[in-house]
Amino acid sequence: MGKYVDGFVIPIKKDGIERYRALAQTASRKHIECGALEYVECVGDDLDSEHTATFPDIAGIGESETVVFTFVVYESKEARDAANATLMGDEEVTAMMETASNVFDPKRMAFGGFRTIVESYGKQARSGSAGKYVDGFVLPLKKGNVDSYQKMSEKASTVWMEHGALEYVECAGDDLNSEHTTSFPEMAGAGEEETVIFAYIVYASKEDRDRANAAIMEDERIKEMMKDEDHPFDPSRMAYGGFRTIVEAFKN
């Protein structure tokens, strides 16, 4: 544990997904070349949620739009900063960013840097091509509750991994200021005394995700956790959704 994650939540037109994928394929290659360990782009698939906020809610999307959920993983914040500095000076990346404005509105994109607080990986986490499935989460959290949230998440990660998740990663906001885009505090509605949690759970397929989630909801450890009224966060303010991966890249 101790990695660093750049997270993105981006509204895009549903009919622009393939154009976005083409950009993301170039972006993934460049990020891996510059030191990223993992680069995964996902597009909204199951965005309805009965008991929580949704990504359409926080991203403010219209009927013709969906949401992209993206995470780029680095060994450390220093590695992330060095990679981003290199990327910003790369001519291919500059050309790609000019094209990107025709595919989505960068001002509506939420971007931030997050330090990992919980990490669990299965043996097959990096195997295979694009086609996995991701449950994504964004939630505001009081800064004073990060430690108690981490302890809760550590217990939860054990349950999720036992039921078939390939990756379970929770991250706390670290570098959330963004000059040219929306910030995660803005998108998540976080106050001055709050930070933002960015989390994702990776499965081999949507079928595996659905099976795992059904089993998890019946797991006595989760039932006990849900009975606890002293939650470190407000579930109704948590955005939750299911995403299908469209680009995956990993450092060899």
Image: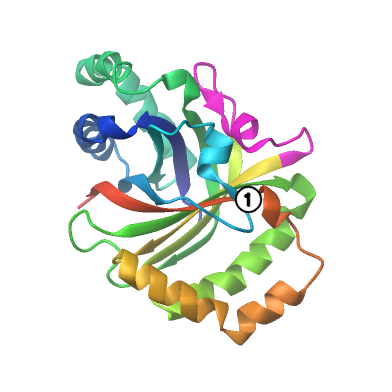
The amino acid type found where label 1 is placed reads Met
Question: Who's the residue at 66% across and 80% down the image?
Answer: 223
Between 49 and 33, the residue placed more toward the observer is 49
Instruction: Quickly name the residue at label 1.
Output: 238
Question: Who's the residue at 28% across and 59% down the image?
Answer: 132
Label 1: how many residues lie within 10 Å, few (<14), some (14-19) or many (20+)? many
Start and end of the magenta stretch? 176-194
Q: Residue furthest right?
A: 230
Instruction: Give the side of residue 69 with respect to residue 19, left or right.
Output: right
Between 102 and 87, the residue placed more toward the observer is 102
| 231, above or below 188, in the image | below
Q: Can residue 165 be seen in this view?
A: no
Question: Who's the residue at 55% across and 55% down the image?
Answer: 49
Q: Residue 174, how many percent across, how many down? A: 60, 38
Q: Residue 109, how many percent across, how many down? A: 46, 27
Residue 175 falls in which quadrant of the image?
Answer: top right
Residue 123 falls in which quadrant of the image?
Answer: bottom left
Residue 149 falls in which quadrant of the image?
Answer: bottom right
| 251, above or below 209, in the image | above
Colour theme: rainbow
The stretch drawn in magenta includes residue 241: no
Between 110 and 149, the residue placed more toward the observer is 110
Instruction: Give the side of residue 208 with respect to residue 217, left or right.
Output: left
Q: Residue 87, how many percent across, how many down? A: 31, 24
Q: Residue 200, how many percent across, how many down? A: 46, 55
Question: Who's the residue at 68% across and 56% down the image?
Answer: 235
